[in-house]
Image (cartoon, grey):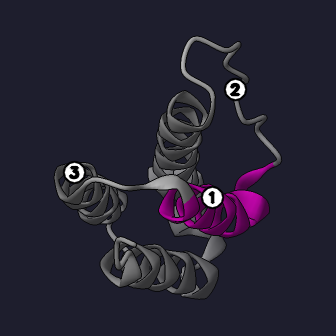
Amino acid sequence: MLDTTPLTRAVDHFADRLRAAPQSRLQRGAAAEALGLARELALRAQRLESPGGPLREMPDAGMFAAADQVMVAGNDLALVLVDESELAQAVALVEEAQRRAGV
């Protein structure tokens, strides 16, 4: 079984930073960046869970839900990952999104 701790730590850290961010930072793009990341992580999880199955897009639940959406999508992906390179890619995605979000 693959140790996905690096991914869960990365999404935990990003979500914590989003929760601590002022509303103005969220409005200036941090929440949109987080939603984009959550959607990408969710799509990756869906592709691994049911290859060839229908893909569903995570809805926009508002800027104050962005941290929770990152957590849910990241943890869902962590449950289905089996490959080290996919894990490394997911961690890099989270770290890059956090950098772009500025939190």
Q: Is residue 8 left or right of residue 85?
A: right
| Rendering coords of residue 83 (x, y %) | 27, 53
> Residue 68 or 88: which is nearer the viewer?
88
Residue drawn at the location 50% of the way across and 36% of the way down:
48
Give the residue furthest to the front: 1
SS class of the residue under badge 3? Answer: helix
Q: Which mark is residue 84?
A: none
> Mark 3 Cα within 10 Å, few/some/many (few <14, many 20+)?
few
Q: What amino acid does circle 1 point to?
A: Asp
Q: Which of the two discs, 2 and 1, labels the residue nearer the N terminus?
A: 2
Q: CA distance from mark 3 to mark 2?
A: 20 Å
For the stretch drawn in magenta, the main secondary structure is helix
> Residue 8 or 28: which is nearer the viewer?
8
> Residue 77 or 83: which is nearer the viewer?
83
Task: Report which residue position mark 2 lands on.
Answer: 57
- The magenta stretch is 62-79
Q: Which of the two discs, 1 and 3, labels the residue nearer the N terminus?
A: 1
Residue drawn at the location 77% of the way across and 62% of the way down:
65
Residue drawn at the location 54% of the way across and 80% of the way down:
21
Q: CA distance from mark 1 to mark 3?
A: 15 Å
> Residue 44 or 103: which is nearer the viewer?
44
Q: Are marks 3 and 2 in contact (CB under 8 Å)?
A: no
Q: CA distance from mark 2 to mark 1?
A: 14 Å
| Rendering coords of residue 94 (x, y %) | 34, 60
Quadrant location of the C terminus in the rendered image: bottom left
Is label 2 or label 1 in front? 1
Q: Which mark is residue 76?
A: 1
Q: What amino acid does circle 2 point to?
A: Glu
Q: What amino acid does circle 3 point to?
A: Gln
Residue drawn at the location 49% of the way across and 64% of the way down:
78
Give the residue furthest to the right: 61
Task: Report which residue position mark 3 lands on.
Answer: 89
